[in-house]
Image (cartoon, rainbow, N blue to C red):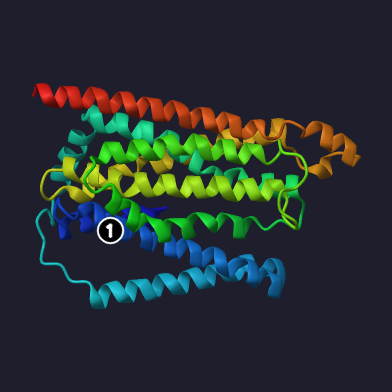
Amino acid sequence: MVGGSFIKSVISGSVAKETTEVNRARGYSIFYMMVNIGAFTGKTVIDPLRDVIGEKAYIYINYFAGAMSMVALLAVYFLYKSLHTAGEGKSMKELTQGFLRIIKNGRLLLLILIVTGFWMVQQQLYATMPKYVIRMAGEAARPGWIANVNPLVVVLFVGFITRLMAKKSALTSINVGMVLIPVSALCMAMGNMLGSDILSGMSNITLMMIIGIVFQALAECFISPRYLEYFSLQAPKGEEGLYLGFSHLYSFLSSIFGFGIAGVLLTKYCLDPLLYTSHEQWQAASAHAHYIWFYFAGIGLIAALALYIFAKVTRSIDKKK
């Protein structure tokens, strides 16, 4: 948690300092692509490792992560140099004043809350999806590989989508992504609503989960680079790191609420089959398991509508100014 707090704010701020307003969105798309290369690599290693050494893989994967972090640290130490030092060496008083300016900025706080709605749905890739897929598609399901669809799609498309939306405002691009996120949740729900399996050798649960994750990843491509760009442009010169560190507050909020809601919904609609004395009892109890995704589709839709209103109101205010 502490390491992530340093990394997210410092790297986000560094991208803002090393780019101009013209190419900043592209800079963040490269940053986001690199983040997802890491996510893809980590998920790719764990399942083969588990096949070889069993459950001890969850111990050894930490050695892998630590080694990769050390390689990254050495690469940054020896290869990264910046001539842009404005804002470095601030006193605690200056940092406190900057932080107070942020929390008094109602526009930024409201945007964080709205985007939290999107990330609450995105968090279900880890909060709900693994248990949902294993319980509904069987123990042979591989949620690690399914989750890997997300970073793969982001790596392949984030640069293209950012260039595609380059002439559009940041809020317009974020709006497109927000519309896609309830669609992704509805696709995930359809897996339990379809009849016989569409593809031989793959359950509808797995198939529709993958399709839903593709939509989810595309939504990230529209949202994440431009969200960081928007925040960076609100920051006074030399305070980019402070503002962009604060922009990641959605991560805390979406984790707390997203995982909490996931636990409640899994308990209500999709309990562990081992808790039932017969398969028929479990089938009856899990008949409406897909309702979980309707809740998250609703959260995504509310967030999309809220952002649409936010964009309309802020543009009107800016025009009057």
Q: Position of residue 92 (x, y in %)?
A: 17, 47
Q: Which residue is mark 1?
A: 11
Which residue is at 54% across, 48% downward? 213
Q: Quadrant location of residue 27?
A: bottom left
Q: Is residue 179 left or right of residue 170?
A: right
Which residue is at 77% across, 42% downward? 272
Q: Quadrant location of residue 19?
A: bottom left
Q: Do we see residue 122 in this rendering?
A: yes
Which residue is at 54% across, 33% downward? 296
Nearest the eye: 4 or 163 = 163
Above or below residue 63? Residue 249 is above
Q: Is residue 110 left or right of residue 294?
A: left
- Assign the C terminus to one quadrant of the image: top left
Q: Is residue 16 left or right of residue 59?
A: left
Q: Position of residue 66 (x, y in %)?
A: 47, 70
- Mark 1 is on which residue type? Ile
